[in-house]
């Protein structure tokens, strides 16, 4: 039995079966051979399969500019990440954006079902090339007779005119605003090039959008909060639970990515303190649930990783492609007109461009190289069926390489997630 004990042996997680079971039940049931191992299917991808796959693409993300008024301490483009680009002021040309959109629409044009396409705008700071966004949105209207098109943007909200607000509202943009919590935390991380913090301007601009259209504000604005492990999780939680301007809007917490980065080199992390803070936050959520109090978006955000655990536990079959996209969802277009799998992967894995189109041999190689690593390194791992690793986890200098540190961290996190999931379930939160 490939099992580990959780919460001091009260429960076990069985890797081969992808199940959490009670201690009393486990031995007799396994002896009776009640459960079958959950299969890991091997993905077999040919260039023809990939040419079919891309017809299901439904999301084009434009790197409209690499320019940004901020110089965030953890920015992957700030120079402290080994394989990502360094700061630049390059902007996408309109002809590149239009060719990218036309190319996508040409690839998916015959599709009969699911005629919904998302266009998202990304940077640097996308608002630093607002004129291009406006032109692409206007141009995309030529497709709206046959397609439903939705618009998205991720922004630091430091550049905002009244004209921009009107345009965003008129085109029902779904906006993700980067906001790292209270001023004391945000202003240490999200700074302008002169070192000054950006919290005041972000909050002021949020007010302006809310005043312009409260319904739009509630429905279309969400937040991305980047968490650095030396900061207080409780302070971030309190901010999102109490601040009137943010407490009703969806929020997502993401962590500063430690891989291939010098970010944490000069930072002292107190893991014990962090674990205690996390337990305190979960305890508050348990108490709210017990009292039948409404959970806020920040509570849901804190529970999201456990929803993912639940979802992964319920999967019957997994593939050795794990959590990676298969070129059938999102497509990322960089300022120079090159296609990539998403905005998070470093720029050494492009598989085509707006002039020559997709290079299916490169896509096939990505899948082959990535799954070879998974087959070699992950087959015997107890967490194989729960670990949603994807291309970006092993993307180095143009090749995929297994990352031992990532793996070790992942194992610790998954055990903790399973233990907290069991605890939350026993307290009625799930
Ligand atoms: S706003 Fe985004 S792109 Fe700009 S410095 Fe911060 S993390 Fe980097
Ligand atoms: S990356 Fe590590 S933790 Fe994840 S399945 Fe592979 S060996 Fe296990």
Image (cartoon, grey):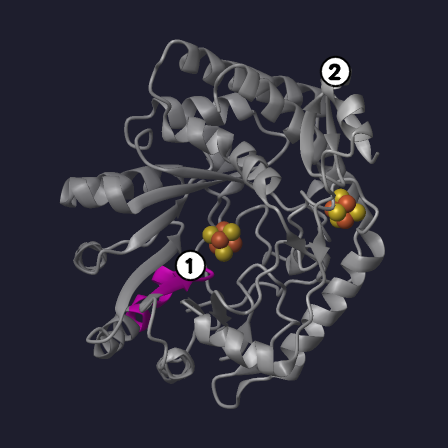
The disc placed on residue 255 is none
Neighbour tally class for label 2: few under 14, some 14-19, many 20 plus, Cα within 10 Å? few
Note whether 247 is above or below 359 in the view shown: above
The disc placed on residue 24 is 2
| Residue 186: image location, x then y, percent | 47, 36
The residue at 78%/40% (across/down) is: 382
Is the CB–ligand 1 distance for label 1 below 8 Å? yes
In the structure shown, which secondary structural element does the residue marked by tag 2 occupy? helix
Note whether 40 is above or below 364 in the view shown: above
- Distance between the alpha carbons at the discs numbered 2 and 1: 55 Å
| Residue 96: image location, x then y, percent | 41, 82
Q: Which quarter of the figure has residue 85?
A: bottom right
| Residue 184: image location, x then y, percent | 48, 29
Could you tell me if residue 398 is visible in this image? no
The residue at 28%/31% (across/down) is: 245
**Image depth: mark 2 or mark 1 in front:** 2
Neighbour tally class for label 1: few under 14, some 14-19, many 20 plus, Cα within 10 Å? many
Magenta segment: 118-133
Residue marked by disc 1:
125
The residue at 63%/82% (across/down) is: 47
Closer to the camera in the image, 290 or 219 = 290
């Amino acid at each position: 039995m490939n099992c580990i004990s959780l919460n001091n042996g009260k429960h076990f997680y069985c890797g081969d079966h992808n199940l959490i079971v009670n201690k009393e039940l486990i031995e007799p049931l396994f002896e009776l051979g009640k459960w079958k191992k959950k299969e890991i299917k091997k993905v077999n991808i040919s260039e023809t399969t990939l040419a079919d796959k891309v017809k299901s693409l439904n999301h084009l993300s434009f790197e409209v500019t690499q320019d940004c008024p901020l110089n965030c301490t953890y920015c992957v483009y700030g120079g402290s990440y080994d394989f990502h680009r360094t700061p630049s002021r390059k902007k996408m040309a309109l002809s590149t954006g239009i060719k990218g959109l036309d190319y996508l629409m040409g690839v998916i044009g015959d599709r009969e079902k699911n005629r919904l396409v998302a266009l998202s705008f990304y940077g640097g700071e996308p608002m630093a090339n607002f004129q291009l966004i406006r032109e692409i949105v206007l141009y995309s209207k030529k497709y709206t007779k046959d397609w439903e098109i939705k618009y998205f943007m991720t922004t630091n909200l430091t550049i905002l005119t009244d004209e921009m607000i009107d345009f965003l509202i008129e085109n029902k943009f779904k906006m993700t605003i980067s906001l790292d919590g209270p001023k004391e935390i945000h202003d240490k991380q999200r700074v302008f090039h002169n070192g000054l913090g950006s919290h005041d301007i972000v909050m002021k601009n949020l007010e302006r959008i809310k005043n312009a259209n409260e319904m739009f504000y509630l429905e279309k604005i969400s937040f991305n909060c980047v968490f650095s492990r030396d900061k207080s999780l409780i302070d971030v939680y309190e901010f999102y639970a109490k601040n009137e301007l943010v407490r009703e809007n969806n929020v997502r917490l993401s962590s500063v990515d430690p891989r291939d980065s010098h970010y944490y080199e000069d930072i002292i992390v107190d893991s014990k303190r962090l674990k205690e803070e996390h337990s305190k936050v979960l305890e508050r959520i348990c108490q709210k649930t017990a009292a039948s109090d409404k959970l806020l978006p920040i509570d849901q955000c804190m529970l999201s990783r456990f929803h993912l655990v639940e979802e992964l536990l319920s999967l019957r079959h997994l593939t050795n492609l794990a959590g990676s996209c298969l070129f059938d969802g999102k497509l990322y277009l960089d300022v120079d007109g090159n296609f990539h799998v998403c905005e998070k992967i470093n720029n050494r894995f492009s598989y085509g461009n707006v002039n020559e189109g997709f290079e299916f041999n490169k896509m096939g190689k990505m899948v082959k190289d990535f799954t070879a690593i998974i087959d070699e390194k992950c087959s015997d791992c107890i967490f194989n069926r729960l670990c949603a690793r994807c291309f970006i986890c092993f993307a180095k200098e143009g090749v995929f390489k297994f990352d031992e540190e990532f793996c070790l961290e992942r194992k610790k996190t998954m055990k903790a997630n399973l233990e907290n999931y069991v605890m939350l379930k026993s307290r009625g939160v799930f």
